[in-house]
Amino acid sequence: MGKLAKWWVIVSNSPKSNFLKNLLIILAVLAFGWSLVLSMPVFNQYKKVLNQEDYQKAIFKVISVHYDPGRVSKAISTSSTWFARGLIRGKEERFSLVAYVKQPHSESELMRLVPIGSEIDVWYNPEQPNAIIAGETLRVLIFNENTFTDTHKYFKGLLLVAYGPFFLVLMLLVFVKIFYGGSNIVPSEES
């Protein structure tokens, strides 16, 4: 048995024998937290893909724009948001401008970028919720001929990024448990 193998047998028989398993459990918890953080964007993309047939092209006429620079304090930090209120087919709606214009530094800059009275081509689905979730509205989407093709690709990639690390760590944990069973990861010379 080589020096490294002997060293590992000593380490694996020590109180730290479950180091690899414990490390993988910690990584699984962190990966699960990562998955939770990204669950809302995944949900948004899923809703768009699921309901893509219900969206119709429409015109969004801007009646006001809103900019919130966010806040940073010891207790809480919020990110900046910018959106417009406008009319679609005579009904007042909100439209997240995050994908439409670069982040402004003030409300006056946003008003220059998106003047009141502007008409913006959008995809509209009045059956979706009106809330801004994870930086976007599901009811009003920026118009692009490839919106739903791009959304489909983005959804698949986001699924991989959001849940891939968690399942990878779980598979490694199962692998360690199956192949190494007990605390001694390196088989002894008797076996």
Image (cartoon, rainbow, N blue to C red):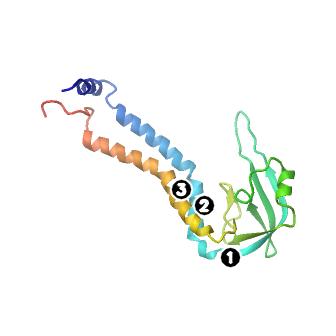
Q: Are marks 3 and 1 in contact (CB under 8 Å)?
A: no
- Residue at position x 74%, y 74% from top? 58
Q: Position of residue 100 (x, y in %)?
A: 73, 60
| Disc nearer the start of the sequence (1/2) | 2
Of 84 and 181, nearer the camera is 84
Q: Is 111 left or right of 150, judged from the image as shown?
A: right
Q: Quadrant of the N terminus?
A: top left
Query: SS class of the residue under badge 1?
Result: strand
Q: Nearer the viewer, residue 57 or 25?
A: 57
Label 3 sits on what residue type? Answer: Leu
Report whether 182 appears left or right of 75: left
Q: Residue at x 31, y 41 (%)?
A: 176
Which of the two marks, 1 or 2, is nearer to us in this view?
A: 1
Crowdedness of circle 3 by 10 Å Cα count: few (<14), some, many (20+)?
some
Q: Residue 37 appears at what percent x and percent y? A: 57, 48
On residue 158, the disc is: 3
Q: Earlier in the sequence, mark 2 or mark 3?
A: 2
Disc 1 marks which residue?
56
Q: Which mark is residue 44?
A: 2
